[in-house]
Amino acid sequence: MCGIFGCILKNGNAAPVIHEALKRLEYRGYDSVGEATIHNGKLYIKKDQGKIDEVHKTRNLDDLPGSLGIGHTRWATHGAPLEVNAHPHVDCSGQIALVHNGIIENFSELKLELEGLGHVFKSRTDTEVIVHLIEQVLKNNPSLGLADAVLEATKRLDGSYAIAVISTKEPNKIICARHESPLVVGVNENAIYCASDIPAFLPLTNKAVIINDGELVTLSLEGYEIKKITDASLVLREPKIIDWTPEMAVKQGYPHFMLKEIHEQPETLRNTLRLQEHYLDLMATFLDRAREVFLVACGTSYHACLAASYMFSKLAFLATYPVIASEFVEQHGKSVNIDSTILAVSQSGETADTLAAVNCARQRAATVLGLTNVIGSTLTRVSRVYVGQQSGPEIGVAATKTFSSQLSVLAQLALRLAKKRGKVSQDEMDFLAEKLEKLPDTVETIIQTQEEKVKQIAKKYKDAKTFFFLGRGISTATAYEGRLKLMEIAYVPAIAFPAGESKHGPISLVEQGFPVVFVCPKDETHKILIGNIMEMKARGASIIAVIEEGDEEIKKLADDYIEVPKGIPEVLSPIPFVIPLQLLAYYMAVERGHNPDMPRNLAKSVTVK
Ligand code: M6R
C-alpha cells in the first residue's frame, strides 16, 4: 500500500502542493518519498528513503520548478526501502516518470524481456518495468501518444496498479490507470489532481471522480478523459461532491481507523496472494530441513502462529511449537541449536520480546525466518529469509487486517511445505489454492451481510461483565484472538480456551446469562463442539455462535448467531471466522463509550521487554 498523487495547476508551483498532499497520504506508507515535475521541457526529480519530513529537511521537496508533477509515498513490498527504489521511476531516456501503487506479479518476465531489448534497470522494484514498458511501446510505435502507450503497456501487466505517468514529450498531461488499487481524480477551476484517495486533495477541492478498475484517465487543464483499457472506449462520469469533515477524510469516512482497517481486509488479503512465491519456497525448504520448528510471536501475531501450528500439522504433517516470545528464552533458550528453525512473526518487526527470542536463537546458530509487515524492520535484517505480509500501515492499535494477512501467508507457506513433502495430492492443493483465492470475496461478503447483526449483538451484550470465547482445533486460535480484541479495546474481561477444557475448571464461572462465544466451523470438531455448547447452555449461558451459513443444528441452540459463507476448508477457517469477532470487539468498545483506536495503556509497537 503506497500513496500516489499528481497535479496540474493553472498557476504556481506543483511541488509544494504535491508535498502537502503526500503528507496527507503518509498513512499509506512512509519508507521513502519522491516527486517529479516538468518545467520547460525538462524532468526534475527529488526522492529519498525515509519519512516525508526527514527527506524534506535534507532535500527541500518544495524546490522543484513547474506547475505539473507527480509524487509518491512508499510502503516497501518489493525492493528494500532505499533511495534507489523510491518512486518516481524513470525510463532510459529520462523523459518519462511514473509513480505506482500496487504489485506487478509478472515483473520478472517483463524485466527479462526488456533487458533483452537493451533497457537498463536501476532499482529492484517491480514498478520500474512499467516505465520501461511504456518507453518500449513508444519505440515500437513512434506515432502513439502517451495515453495510448500507457494503455498498451498496462495490457501486459498482471497484478494490481494505480499509476500516474508524465513525459517531457507531452508536458501538459498526466496519464493515470488503475487495476485493483485505488485511484481518484479531483477537479476545480484552477487545477486537476489524481490521488490514491480523496483526503489527499480534499483541502483543495471537494469535487471527486472515482476511477474504476480497468480504466485509464488523461488529465489536463482542459479536464479529464476516461477510457476503458480493454477497448479504449470513452466513459462519461461526472464529479461527485464529497462532504467529509477533515477528521472523517483521514479515515476515509469511517469513524475509526480500526473499522476502516477491518473493512480493508478484502484488499489486504488479495495483496498477500502476490509476489511471495520465491521467498515462500525458500522458507518451506528451511522448514523442511529443520529438526525442530518454533513459531515465535506476541499477542495477535502469536495467535497467527497458534493457527499456523495446526496448518503445518494438518497439511504438511510437520509438528511445530508455537511459543509466546517473552517465554522463549526461559523455555527453549538452552536447548535451541543449529538444527532448530525459528519462524518469528511480527507485524512491526520491532517487538522487543520477539527480537529477544530471535537473538537468543541466532546466538545458538539456529536458523531465523521472519514474517513481518515492515520491510526494513529489525526482523527483516536479522532473518535468513523473510516474507512481507503486505498489509500496508495499520494505525489502529488493535491488529485486525495484519492478523488475517499473517494467516493467509502462513497458510500459503504450509501448502508449499506440504507440496514439498508430498503430503497433499495435487487435487487437494488446487482445491485449497482456489479457496484461498476466494477468501477476499468471502470476507467482503461477511462484512457486507453480518456487520449490522454484530452491531445489534454488541448492543445486547454491552453491559456483560465477562465473556468466554471457545473453539476446538484450529478455531481455538480464533477464539483467543476474539477474546484479545474484546479485552484490549472494550475493556471487558474475557477468557478463551479450547472448548474441551470447560469441564476441567472454567465452567464453574458460568451462571444465568453468562455470554459464551463459540467459533463453529463445520469441520471435524463440529459434533463434539455441539456437546460443549449444550453443557454451557445447561448452566444458563447465553450462546453467541459464529457458524457456517445454514448450520441449523447450532442455530437452534444459539441465542444469537453470525453466519459466514459455507464451504471454507478447516485450515483456512480462522480468516473468515475472526472477522465477526473483530467487529464484535469494535462495536462493544463503541457501545461502552471507548475509543477503539487508542486503548489505554497500550502502544502499537511494544519495543520494551
Ligand atoms: O508487531 P507485532 O506483531 O510483533 O506485535 C505483537 C503484539 O504486540 C500485537 O499483536 C498486539 O497484541 C496487538 N495490538 C493486538 O491487537
Image (cartoon, rainbow, N blue to C red):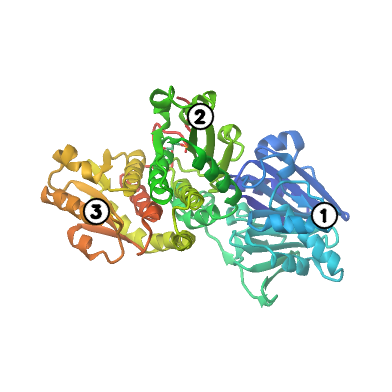
Which amino acid type corresponds to the residue marked 3 in the rendered image? Ile
Point 64% across, 75% down: residue: 236
Point 26% across, 51% down: residue: 518
Which amino acid type corresponds to the residue marked 2 in the rendered image? Val
Q: Which residue is mark 3?
A: 544
Is residue 369 found left or right of 262 in the rendered image?
A: right
Q: Position of residue 107 (x, y in %)?
A: 69, 56
Q: Circle 3 sits in a helix, a strand or a loop, which is it?
A: strand
Q: Which residue is mark 1?
A: 119
Mark 1 or 2, nearer chain start: 1
Mark 1 or 3, nearer chain start: 1
Point 18% across, 62% down: residue: 556
Residue placed most toward the observer, 368 or 17: 368
Question: In the rendered picture of this protein, how many numbered marks are placed on residues?
Answer: 3
State which quadrant residue 146 falls in.
bottom right
Q: Circle 1 sits in a helix, a strand or a loop, which is it?
A: loop
Contact flag, marks 1 and 2 (Cβ < 8 Å) = no
| Mark 3 burial class by Cα count in 10 Å: few <14, some 14-19, many 20+ | many
Rounded to the nearest whole Å, what is the CA distance between mark 1 and mark 2?
41 Å
Q: Which residue is mark 2?
A: 358
Q: Circle 2 sits in a helix, a strand or a loop, which is it?
A: helix
Task: Evaluate whether residue 464 shows in this view.
Answer: no
- Foreground tag (1 vs 3): 1
Q: Position of residue 408 (x, y in %)?
A: 47, 51
| Mark 1 burial class by Cα count in 10 Å: few <14, some 14-19, many 20+ | some
Q: Position of residue 187 (x, y in %)?
A: 66, 62
Which amino acid type corresponds to the residue marked 1 in the rendered image? His
Rounded to the nearest whole Å, what is the CA distance between mark 1 and mark 3?
60 Å
